[in-house]
Image: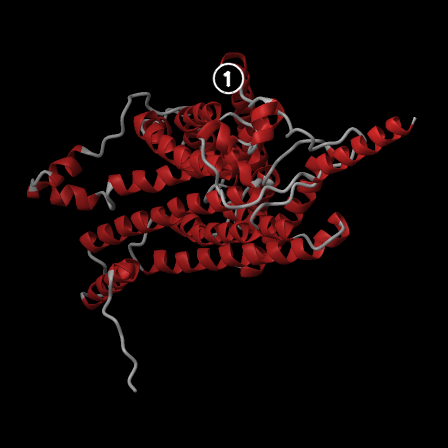
Amino acid sequence: MKPQFEPLSSRSTVLKVLLAGVLLLLVASAAGAQVSGEVTYVFNTYAFLVWGAFIMWMCAGFTMLEAGSVRTKNASVICMKNIGLYSIAGIAYYVIGYNLMYVDVSGWIGSITPLFEASADEMAFLGGDADKAAAVIGSGYSEMSSWFFQMTFVATTASIVSGALAERVKLWSFLIFTAVLTAVIYPIVGAWTWGGGWLAELGFQDFAGSTIVHSTGGWAALAGIIMVGARSGKFRSDGSVKGTPPSNVPIVTLGVFILWMGWFGFNGGSQLALGGAADATAMGNLLINTNLGAAAGVVAALVLSRPLLGRVDLLAVLNGALGGLVGVTAGPDLVGHHWALLIGAIGGVVTVAGMKLLERMKLDDVVGAVPVHLFAGIWGTLAVCIAAGGSFVPQVIGIVVIGVFAFGASILLWWVLEKTVGVRVSPEVEELGQDMTELGIESYPEFILMPDEDDMEAARAAQEHARDSAGE
């Protein structure tokens, strides 16, 4: 019996887009070795849009990772925070962030003119003015596609903060913080670097954002952890740490795989062009190094977790993958793939060791965001000096200055929020869970709520005390 094949449906949209891209490439190749300006424009724009969609999908990865890491009573508010932060980040970046980061950068900041606008030529061309075609094509890419690609990066920075402060930060306080982070703090860091500001002139290198994106988010998360404080009962009076296992391990694992996939857009798209053979070859190199860095981070964390944490820790291994990805992000354009293995492996080690360090310092980071994004981000930015052409002094200056600014601005903002609207939920809300108290919805309404182990132990002790008292 012959197999029956169904016609392509709407579910094959991604495949259709990819096939269309291949056909365009074949047409360009047939036209000759020299790619025309219009074809270059199409492919550069196409790359920005597709890779931007990959990075946007990372928001789903962050949502799954965080929702699976928290207790079931807080999973719905995690979903609300992540769709909220993506939306707020996009609007904030449109209103002021992009212009502050890229338009007329004077060395320190760009334009404070509100609202992003594409070039006049591009808008006229959209309006049907065919005479503007040459000017639009001559720019090399659609300005709107570039804005979309850059916007997805700022949303990633905000996502880093969400997981670190889960289960005790107020929803609206977090969303207000997100608005300022994405409208002002991140764009200023970007203006200094990718916008051509003073750090770029100094020679600071960060290809896809180990420091610019990840460490900035990590510093903001660390400031929040300090200001909001640890979850109730996380650190016991005897110095021990209360285990808070994830509510859904498969969902956490899925989230990491989604992030891993999105990272191909993060690093590959940062080539910022797909106009010829050189760009296409460079993208292949970027994706291989990205994948190798993540894989090495997994293996390193797998090996280290037992001696350091006392067990083969799946969550540490998953964070090892992310630490490897963050580590290689500053210099994924290096040519020797073996360097990606080394940098990614050390990123995994730094992440696992950082998780242990935070526990000893009694800093409660629910998902390990600070070790992954801040610690591994610092390592990755320094690793650019090994094989990606970076100079040590500019890299150190960039790490320190961006750290001081991002942490200082963030802790000031958290302090202002604490003094005005408050940043931490009440003990009653924390006990009941933010899902029911802030959203009025349960993530898993058919599940049976199991009592906390420490609460059970306290109840047993109280019963024994009552029996002893009755016997007297």
On screen, residue 145 versus residue 334, left or right, reads: left
The residue depicted at 51 percent of the width and 15 percent of the height is 416
On screen, residue 328 versus residue 9, left or right, reads: right
Residue 181 x %, y % = 45, 27
The residue depicted at 31 percent of the width and 26 percent of the height is 95
Q: Does residue 195 appear anywhere in the picture?
A: no
Q: Which residue is labeled 1 in the image?
A: 417
Residue 461 x %, y % = 81, 33
Q: Does residue 39 appear anywhere in the picture?
A: yes
Quadrant of the image occupied by residue 132: top left
On screen, residue 451 versus residue 471, left or right, reads: left
On screen, residue 316 versus residue 442, left or right, reads: right
Label 1 Cα crowd, 10 Å radius (few <14 / some 14-19 / many 20+) = some
Badge 1 amino acid: Leu
In the foreground, 307 or 312: 312
Name the secondary structure under disc 1. Answer: helix
Instruction: Work out which quarter of the rendered image holds the C terminus and state it.
Output: top right
Instruction: Work out which quarter of the rendered image holds the N terminus and state it.
Output: bottom left
Residue 217 x %, y % = 51, 34
The residue depicted at 54 percent of the width and 32 percent of the height is 398
Quadrant of the image occupied by residue 152: top left
Is residue 452 depicted above or below 23 in this figure?
A: above
- Image label count: 1
Residue furthest to the right in view is 472
